[in-house]
Image (cartoon, grey):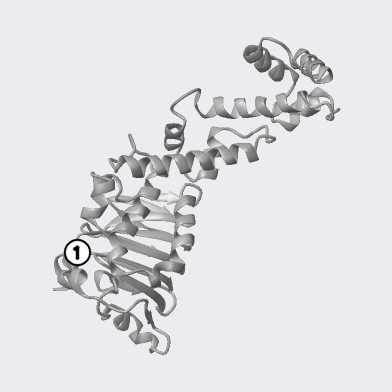
């Protein structure tokens, strides 16, 4: 049975499947009769407008595969008949580098382009797709459930490119090493991918994962967020929403990184004040206070004075006079 092969077959890596040199009328049949680990037999495929073609590089791990493919425009149908014929209990995570798809997933109309799309191979779906290039990771449900206990909440996810940026970064870093990794590393690689994915999803709480792994993820994400804050302080429009887009995560997930203290807005405000205080106390920086304030992201004198007085109990001008006087006495 195909499901049995999914779990037991071992093969050299990577494996290349391509329709190059195959007659156009035979391309779909050629692709769909591939042996493991091609996922082609899992779908009924129909070409759209032009002959079907594909070039796919496949990396096989234990209970997990990753494939990178360039595919012509086509329609895909995962019917109940196909589900019964090929009983695999996996979720497909597609990292779309370019292209667009539209169809029915989870009983709902879905459409999306560059980003991350998730589909449950145990449930019927159908979609049409333009010419595309993508990575597809097939991960067993039992592994997905370790990170997302309710896999139905993940199924049907259409994550846009901004929120999917951590996944793009992960794949860019890991893909060159797939061919050298032993098959036994598959489950660990899959879990790492799922933990990164969790940062960009709207969930009620962080996944129930190992505390040490969670701490590492949170520390890394918080450090990246603070770096982005420091890089964008001069932008007066920079706020929590902009930071979430740059981080490639939902606002809810971003807020969880800053649960302690004054939250995201408080951290941005404090970083601006830090930079301004340093500038005010610099005897060699002779720029007007208004100019310094603008370079730190404050919109105007009124906002600056209000914020500065609330935090320090004095105006920026008074703070500067005291700081310079202390410097002169040294």
| Percent position of residue 148, x then y | 27, 45
In the foreground, 85 or 251: 251
Which residue sits furthest top? 313
Measured along the vertical axis of the image, is residue 292 above or below residue 321? Answer: below
In the foreground, 96 or 289: 289
Q: Is residue 242 left or right of residue 199?
A: right
For label 1, the crowd category at 10 Å Cα-Cα, with few meaning under 14, some 14 to 19 and many 20 or more, is some
Measured along the vertical axis of the image, is residue 135 above or below residue 203? Answer: below
Q: Quadrant of the C terminus?
A: top right
| Percent position of residue 49, x then y | 43, 74
Asked whether the viewer can see residue 100, the reply is no
Which residue sits furthest front? 330
| Percent position of residue 193, x then y | 37, 54
Measured along the vertical axis of the image, is residue 198 above or below residue 255? Answer: below
| Residue at the (36%, 68%) spot, across then down | 181
| Residue at the (41%, 65%) spot, across then down | 135
Where residue 329 sits, quadrant-wise, is top right
| Residue at the (60%, 37%) spot, across then down | 229
Query: Which residue was labeled with disc 1?
Result: 88
Q: Quadrant of the N terminus?
A: bottom left
In the foreground, 230 or 253: 230
| Percent position of residue 199, x then y | 41, 43
Q: Is residue 144 left or right of residue 237?
A: left
Secondary structure category for the residue under label 1: loop
Mark count: 1
| Residue at the (51%, 44%) spot, across then down | 247
């Amino acid at each position: 049975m195909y499901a049995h092969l999914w779990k037991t077959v071992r093969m050299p890596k990577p494996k290349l499947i391509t329709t190059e040199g195959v007659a156009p009328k035979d391309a779909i049949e050629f692709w769909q009769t591939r042996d493991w680990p091609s996922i082609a037999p899992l779908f009924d495929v129909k070409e759209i407008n032009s002959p079907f073609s594909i070039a796919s590089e496949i990396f096989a791990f234990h209970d997990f595969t990753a494939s990178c493919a360039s595919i012509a425009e086509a329609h895909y149908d995962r019917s109940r008949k196909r589900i019964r014929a090929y009983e695999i209990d996996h979720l497909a995570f597609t990292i779309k580098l370019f292209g667009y798809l539209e169809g029915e997933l989870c009983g709902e109309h879905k459409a999306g382009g560059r980003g991350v799309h998730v589909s449950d191979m145990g449930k019927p779906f159908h979609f049409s797709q333009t010419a595309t290039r993508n990575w597809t990771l097939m991960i067993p449900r039992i592994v997905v459930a370790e990170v997302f206990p309710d896999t139905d909440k993940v199924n049907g996810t259409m994550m846009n490119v901004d929120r999917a940026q951590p996944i793009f970064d992960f794949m860019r870093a890991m893909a060159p090493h797939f061919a050298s990794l032993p098959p036994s590393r598959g489950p660990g690689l899959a879990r790492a991918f799922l933990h990164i994915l969790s940062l960009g999803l709207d969930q009620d709480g962080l996944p129930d994962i190992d505390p040490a792994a969670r701490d590492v993820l949170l520390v890394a994400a918080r450090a990246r967020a603070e770096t982005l804050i420091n890089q964008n302080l001069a932008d007066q429009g920079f706020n929590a929403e902009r930071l979430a887009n740059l981080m490639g995560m939902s606002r809810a997930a971003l807020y969880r990184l800053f649960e302690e203290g004054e939250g995201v807005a408080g951290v941005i405000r404090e970083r601006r004040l830090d930079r301004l205080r340093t500038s005010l106390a610099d005897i060699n920086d002779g720029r007007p206070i208004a100019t310094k304030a603008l370079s730190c992201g404050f919109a105007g004198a009124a906002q600056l004075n209000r914020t500065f007085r609330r935090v320090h109990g004095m105006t920026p001008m008074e703070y500067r006079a005291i700081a310079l006087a202390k410097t002169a006495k040294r």
